[in-house]
Image (spheres, rainbow, N blue to C red):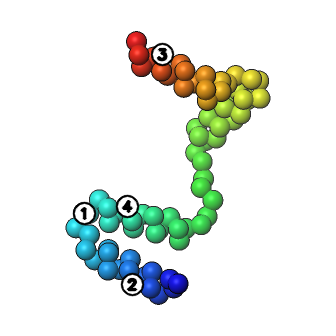
Amino acid sequence: MTTINNLREKLTGKINQIERIDLLEYMLQLIENEEDMSPYQLTAEQQNAVAEALDQYKSGQFISDEDADEEISKWINK
């Protein structure tokens, strides 16, 4: 059975072996995001885009995944 302390030791050992700065920065970002549990704030532009998408959905202006996949396949094969 793995304990929290065992996992921390494993992670610390693995992290100390990493030489890629991009990977370390990404890992730090993940940890910092986990610490900040406040709700994500959308910009006014993002809020407008969400409202527009909801309106489109409510009015039936959408297609199924299958139809979208079919359209994409047709487009790719042209």
Residue 17 against residue 73 in the figure, above or below: below
Residue 74: % across, % down: 48, 16
Gap between marks 2 and 4, in whole Å? Answer: 20 Å
The label on residue 74 is 3
Residue 12 against residue 71 in the figure, above or below: below
Question: Badge 1 is on which residue?
Answer: 20
Question: Badge 4 is on which residue?
Answer: 26
Pick whichever of labels 3 and 1 is earlier in the sequence: 1
| Closer to the eye: label 4 or 3 | 3
Question: Badge 2 is on which residue?
Answer: 9
Task: Give amino acid for label 4.
Answer: Tyr
Q: Residue at x 72, y 29 (%)?
A: 57
Q: At numbered mark 4, what does the secondary structure look like: helix, strand or loop?
A: helix
Q: Residue at x 28, y 77 (%)?
A: 16
Task: Give amino acid for label 3.
Answer: Lys
Residue 42 against residue 70 in the figure, above or below: below
